[in-house]
């Protein structure tokens, strides 16, 4: 179901409040109709509340709604499927976008607040060997409104306040850099979702030039690096991006990020049996990160159908942790939420594509 008419219309939820104010003035001049200044705030509030049709904006007069309908569209992702975990209340969403593309988001309840894990691209072109998001290839970047819309739609569906956001769903955020930056501005806006930068984590497989560009922005978000390997050869085998930007360049960019005032970096390390979980790997990891303001998050690998990697056993994870801790590195092991609904991203989109 491709639909290109949207291309000639304005993607209204990608506008900040001040951009929307300007747009409303332009629209009123263009159409010769009176649109009072305060209408921009009203429209903005409706968009943030998760309406998908202009006619739901009940306090906006009909002639303005008609003008909006003719000139704009609302890019709110629609719930295509939804899975609720019986174990911990985690909810996994398969969202459909205006052109039929599907993406995934996950709602998780933590003690420190409700968290939504969002996608930044429809598919992924990074090709990590162990990851489900890459299996059905890359379709397109998400717009700022489609990235924001996942949070708006989850908040509307659950009726709950969202306090944390992680950019760890489908796609590589730093491969959609400009739209992700605009999204960060939108989600942080006090008049909008008002989610503080300190409550946002962005995860990257290591697009070095954009890590450096992000560093210049000096946003107090948490940067997560999907490291997963401690040698150049092994990282190239698991993550093709390493052929473009070496492990050495990546670690040096991370050190620059911290030196430039960035907050503590979180290194993600998926534990894969007999691949990257030896005592030597742990020792190499400790020396790579030595002296850096960081912490390591160990993730027991999630099995992905069609991929033959297996997760490390408990003993191997414990041994790995002990080595890191003995070298003074802070380590956590990721708790797996929603294990009964296979909450990690990528698999639903892949199975939806193979259905069609
Ligand atoms: N492209 C970004 C965002 C994806 S975040 C990135 O690479 O960081 C998703 C996180 O889950 C990344 O750390 C990714 O490497 C990790 N991941 C992917 N597949 C996994 C799997 N099968 N088991 C455990 N972690 C996985």
Image (tube, helix red, strand yellow):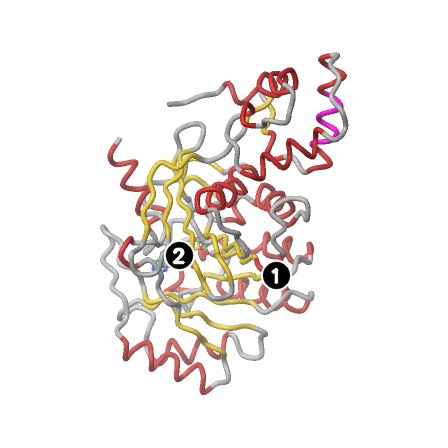
Query: Closest to the observer: 318 or 163?
Result: 163
Q: Main secondary structure of the magenta part?
A: helix
Query: Closest to the observer: 1 or 165?
Result: 165
25 inside magenta stretch: yes
Query: Closest to the observer: 341 or 35?
Result: 35
Residue extending farthest to the bottom is: 326
In the image, is residue 25 above or below residue 15? above
- Circle 2 — which element? loop
- Measured as percent of width and height from the top left, residue 355 is found at 24, 34
- Write down the quadrant of residue 283 in the picture: bottom left
- Measured as percent of width and height from the top left, residue 313 is found at 26, 73
Q: Residues within 10 Å of mark 1 (few under 14, many from 20)?
A: some
Which residue in the structure is indicated by mark 2?
239
Task: Magenta stretch: give its range.
Answer: 20-26
Q: Which mark is on residue 244?
A: none
Residue occupying the point 59% across, 34% down: 46
- Circle 1 — which element? helix
- Measured as percent of width and height from the top left, residue 219 is found at 66, 57
Indicate if the residue with disc 2 has its beta carbon within 8 Å of ligand 1. Answer: yes
Report whether 318 appears left or right of 71.
left
96 inside magenta stretch: no
Ligand 1 visible in quadrant = bottom left
Residue occupying the point 52% across, 33% down: 51
In the image, is residue 2 above or below residue 249? above
């Amino acid at each position: 179901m491709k639909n290109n008419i949207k291309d000639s219309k304005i993607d209204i939820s990608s506008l900040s409040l001040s951009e929307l104010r300007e747009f409303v003035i332009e629209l009123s001049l263009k159409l010769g109709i009176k649109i009072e200044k305060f209408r921009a705030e009203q429209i903005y509030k409706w968009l943030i509340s998760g309406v998908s049709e202009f006619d739901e904006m009940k306090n906006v007069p009909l002639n303005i709604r008609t003008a909006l309908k003719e000139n704009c569209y609302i890019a709110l992702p629609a719930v295509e499927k939804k899975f609720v975990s019986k174990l911990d209340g985690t909810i996994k969403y398969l969202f459909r976008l205006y052109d039929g593309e599907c993406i995934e988001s996950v709602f998780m309840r933590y003690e420190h607040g409700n968290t939504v894990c969002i996608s930044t691209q429809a598919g992924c072109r990074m090709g990590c060997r162990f990851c489900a998001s890459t299996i059905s290839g890359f379709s397109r970047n998400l717009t700022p409104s489609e990235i924001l819309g996942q949070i708006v739609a989850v908040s509307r569906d659950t009726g709950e306040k969202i306090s944390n956001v992680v950019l760890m769903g489908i796609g590589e955020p730093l491969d959609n850099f400009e739209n992700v930056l605009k999204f960060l501005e939108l989600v942080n806006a006090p008049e909008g979702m008002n989610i503080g930068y300190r409550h946002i984590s962005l995860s990257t497989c290591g697009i070095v030039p954009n890590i450096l560009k992000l560093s210049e922005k000096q946003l107090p978000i948490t940067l997560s690096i999907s490291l997963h390997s401690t040698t150049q050869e092994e990282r190239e085998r698991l993550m093709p991006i390493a052929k473009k930007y070496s492990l050495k360049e990546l670690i040096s960019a991370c050190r620059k990020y911290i030196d430039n005032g960035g907050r503590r970096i979180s290194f993600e390390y998926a534990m894969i049996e007999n691949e990257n979980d030896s005592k030597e790997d742990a020792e190499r990891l400790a020396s790579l990160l030595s002296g850096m303001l960081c912490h390591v998050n160990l993730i027991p690998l999630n099995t992905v159908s069609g991929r033959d990697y297996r997760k490390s056993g408990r003993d191997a994870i414990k041994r790995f942790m002990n080595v890191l801790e003995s070298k003074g590195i802070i380590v956590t092991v990721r708790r797996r939420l929603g294990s009964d609904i296979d909450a990690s991203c990528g698999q639903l989109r892949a199975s939806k594509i193979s259905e069609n």
